[in-house]
Image (tube, grey):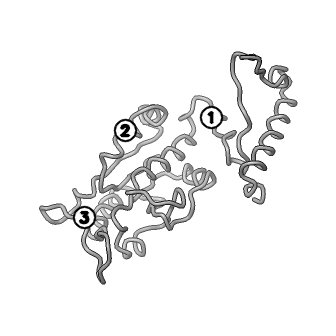
Amino acid sequence: MRIDIISAVPELLESPFQHSILKRAQEKELFEVVVHNLREYCPKKHRQIDDYAFGGGAGMVMMIEPIDNCIRQLKSERNYDEVIFLTPDGELFSQQTANRFSLLENIIILCGHYKGVDERVREHFITREISIGNYVLSGGELAAAVVVDAIGRLIPGVLNDETSALSDSFQDNLLAPPVYTRPATYNNWSVPEVLLSGHEAKIAEWRYEKSLQRTQERRPELLKK
């Protein structure tokens, strides 16, 4: 799988994909992330990518031409399944969306910046608009890192134990159950005996019940799904 990220501030994305799981995934050639500096696609020497909004108002707007140039160049090299724009007014990103994206082959992610992008970009180039939460960031780069991480860990071979992702929170609209490790007793705080029993059916039942309980207490709206 390949993800191309278009950014006004590519330096913000240097670290997230050069460490831990995503770094190993790229070294294994299971996953590829390529970050493109939008300023390199400007037709003018001063590399301007933003301008004042028509009609006035506060804030600058990302210009259509550099974005058009970048997307057209990428599409001339390969076919893309989705062109995603990260924006606060997009659909809320979820585990189910990450699951679907992980099955794709090539994705473009456009990071918003300034006051937003020329609306014609959204009308003519974007196939999906995504938000990672009901708040506003300085730019879409941090959101892109979140989306890419959520997708990348689902690709077969990326995690050492592929079943690990299947038991994550939200996979079945339930929060994950509590987990414990050694020592079995610490400061007189003990691990539930069922987890030490070796009885797989009882352990599975306990985990499911705890998932239901935790979801009911913390995120009851998930149970309606």
| Viewer-side residue, 148 vs 88 | 88
Q: Are marks 1 and 2 in contact (CB under 8 Å)?
A: no
Residue 13 point in image, percent of width and height: 36, 45
In the rendered image, the vertical position of residue 125 relative to residue 211, given as above or below: below
Query: For residue 27, what is the image quadrant?
Result: top left
Residue 205: x and y in percent read: 85, 36
Q: Residue furthest front?
A: 187
The secondary element bearing badge 3 is classed as loop
Kind of residue at badge 2: Ser
Res 162 label: 1
Distance from Cα at disc 2 to Cα at disc 3: 24 Å
Q: Amino acid at mark 1?
A: Glu
Q: Earlier in the sequence, mark 1 or mark 2?
A: 2
Residue, disc 3: 49
Q: Secondary structure at mark 1?
A: loop
- Residue under the image location 73 percent in, 34 percent down: 178
Left or right, 94 with respect to 207, comes to: left
Q: What residue is drawn where x is 30% and y is 67%?
A: 62
Q: Position of residue 38 (x, y in %)?
A: 27, 58
Q: Residues within 10 Å of mark 1 (few under 14, many from 20)?
A: some
Left or right of 14 in this view: 30? right
Residue 15 — which label? 2
| Residue type at tag 3 | Ile
Instruction: Report, in whole angstroms, how far the alpha carbon at label 1 lies from the one at label 2.
Output: 25 Å
Neighbor class of circle 3 (other Cα within 10 Å; few <14, some 14-19, many 20+) is many
